[in-house]
Amino acid sequence: TAFVDIHDVTHIYAGSEDGQPAVEGMTIKVREGEFTAIVGPSGCGKSTVMKLATGLQFPAKGTIIVDGKQVTAPVKLAGMAFQNPVMLPWRTTLKNLLLPLEIVQPHRGRLRSHRKEYEARAEALLAQVGLAGQGSKFPWQLSGGMQQRASLCRALIHEPKLLMLDEPFGALDAFTREELWGIIRDLHAAQRFTVILVTHDLREAVFLADRVFCMSARPGRIIAEREIDLPRPRD
Ligand code: ADP
Ligand code: ADP
């Protein structure tokens, strides 16, 4: 059984100018622990799939099941990272990392009594992405690439079973991007969370993912699905 099961989903935004669906007849099944990518041209509906799978939008037609449950509300077991790392400027990087814990149970209830434990986890994650000792800095004291790494840590702080990545590498220079690719592969190899990455970069999708779904231009449909079984630099 699939961990993320998107079945025959069509979504039309209420605010759509032409009334056309953003995604149409979309079926995607992702197994637990799998690293998948969805690729397609800009505007084809990739972010919409992301919003549907995490319960930020609800489809006009079709069903979405995550971890055995139909999605009827924002999916809090998911960690999310976006193209823009959106850190709160008046909070240190460490305190930005702790934010999801203030929202998601059971962490929310435990945060006060286990603060040191959670801070240690945040520091350990920062060290894994090459940001050891940077937690006390404010986000605006970090480079864009460093903030993007920190936002990956924030997405992982509550040990999500599902990591949703929406073009998180798109705004980075090529060097930083490839470094982060290695880091995210290492984190996935160690923790085996399920990943759905959306990207317009086919090379990135093929390098990172074990399975790639290709979408057509709007209205977005899945037009191909490929297992990636190539020797890659990471192997
Ligand atoms: P992608 O992530 O592949 O660039 P999106 O999922 O963001 O594509 O958008 C798919 C289509 O839906 C686009 O045509 C976009 O203009 C439209 N769209 C996205 N968000 C909204 C919204 N909130 N209201 C109306 N239309 C939207
Ligand atoms: P949009 O107008 O962007 O298409 P919707 O009309 O799908 O958004 O949803 C508007 C709001 O209604 C959502 O933010 C959500 O709070 C609520 N909602 C819609 N469908 C569901 C559902 N199946 N379960 C729970 N809440 C829903």
Image: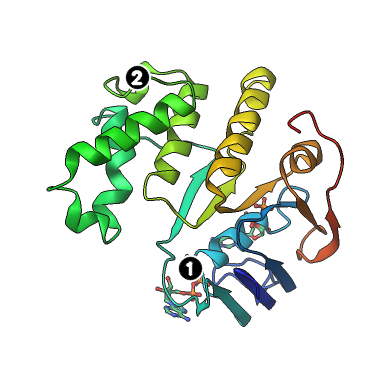
User: Residue 102 location, x and y as percent?
Assistant: 24, 51
Vertical relation: 132 (above or below) 211? above
Q: Residues within 10 Å of mark 2 (few under 14, many from 20)?
A: some
Front position in the image: 222 or 41: 222
Image quarter where ligand 1 lies? bottom right
Amino acid type at image mark 2: Gln
User: Residue 174 location, x and y as percent?
Assistant: 69, 21
Q: Where is the C terminus found, in terms of image quarters?
A: top right
User: Residue 189 location, x and y as percent?
Assistant: 61, 42
Identified at 78% across, 53% down, the residue is 212
Front position in the image: 46 or 156: 156
Identified at 63% across, 23% down, the residue is 179
Identified at 64% across, 73% down, the residue is 5
For ligand 2, tell me if the residue under mark 1 lies within 8 Å: yes
User: Residue 133 location, x and y as percent?
Assistant: 33, 18
In the picture, the disc for residue 114 is none
Label 2 to label 1: alpha-carbon separation:
33 Å
Which circle, 2 or 1, is nearer the viewer?
Answer: 2
Tally the numbered discs. Answer: 2
Determine the image quadrant of residue 121. top left
Q: Secondary structure at mark 2?
A: loop
Residue at which label 2 appears: 134
Q: Secondary structure at mark 1?
A: loop
Residue at which label 1 appears: 55
